[in-house]
Image: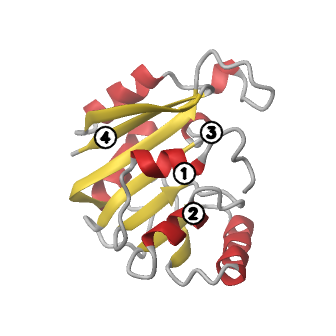
Amino acid sequence: MAGSALLNARAILDAANLRPGMRVADFGAGRTGHLVLPAARLLQEDGTVFAIDIHPEVLSTLHGHRSLHSLTNLYPLRGDIERFGGIDGIPAGSLDRIFIVNTLWTLQRLASIVAEARRLLAHDGQIIVVDWEPNSRHAVAPLATFRVAPQAIDRAFGEGGCRQCGEFQPSRHHWGRIYAH
């Protein structure tokens, strides 16, 4: 799977404690399906995986992955994660897990992302956030000026009404946090 040498999707899914039958979404899924493909396999036919992205060409590629791998529980869905109410097609309060992986460093409106995630998250759900270590020197890491320190994310989620309930290190170049209502 693309990118697995740098960031192991299974480590992230294990930290999220996924179980068959859950409903999950990946905010900013990206075209490789790095997280959503193994999540759809793990959740089996009773579970649901929404691959959220704003770019139509990414969604087209994810539809191709869905067909190629016969993943009937994978639903590519266009949505703007930086706008409250920017994701249509998922009922409020219905997601067991929301993943935001290698995405925050590319975005501007963190408070809106937190609000949209909280809107869609079930009462006992969790938000799993993974992004680049501020001091990583990996060749494909974004410029340090774009990276977001985990403490800043903790503060933003706290201000948005979430509490940190776990942390993990999915790679030596990334930090991981788990938040709940």
The alpha-carbon separation of the residues under discs 1 and 4 comes to 19 Å
Distance in Å between CA atoms under marks 3 and 1? 23 Å
If you read the primary sequence from the N terminus, does the residue marked by circle 3 or circle 1 appear first? 1
Q: Would you say residue 82 is visible in this rendering?
A: no
Q: Nearer the viewer, residue 114 or 164?
A: 164
The reply to whether dot 2 and dot 1 touch (C-beta < 8 Å) is yes
- Residue tagged 4: 179
Can you identify the residue that label 1 sits on?
Answer: 10
Place residue 165 in its image quadrant. Answer: top left
* Viewer-side label of 3, 4: 4
Q: Are marks 1 and 4 in contact (CB under 8 Å)?
A: no
| Element carrying mark 3 | helix
Q: Amino acid at mark 4?
A: Tyr
User: What's the residue type where badge 2 is placed?
Assistant: Pro
Residue under numbered circle 3 = 106
Of residue 8 and residue 117, the one placed in the foreground of this image is 8
**C-alpha separation, residue under disc 3 versus residue under disc 4:** 20 Å
Mark 2 or mark 1: which comes first in sequence? 1
Residue 82: where, in percent of width, then height?
Answer: 48, 49
**Element class at badge 2:** helix
Report the residue at 72% width, 81% height from top: 68
Q: Earlier in the sequence, mark 1 or mark 4?
A: 1
| In this view, 148 is above or below 124 | above
Label 1 crowd bin: few (<14), some (14–19), many (20+), radius 10 Å:
some
Question: Three-letter amino acid code at disc 3?
Answer: Thr
What separation in Å lies between label 4 and label 2 (alpha carbons)? Answer: 22 Å
Question: Could you tell me which residue is drawn at 72 percent across and 23 percent down?
Answer: 143
| Mark 1, secondary structure of its residue | helix
Does 74 sit above or below residue 80?
A: below
Query: Label 2, on which residue?
Result: 38
Tag 3 and tag 2, C-beta contact below 8 Å: no
How far across and down, in percent of the image, does residue 109 sit? 48, 40
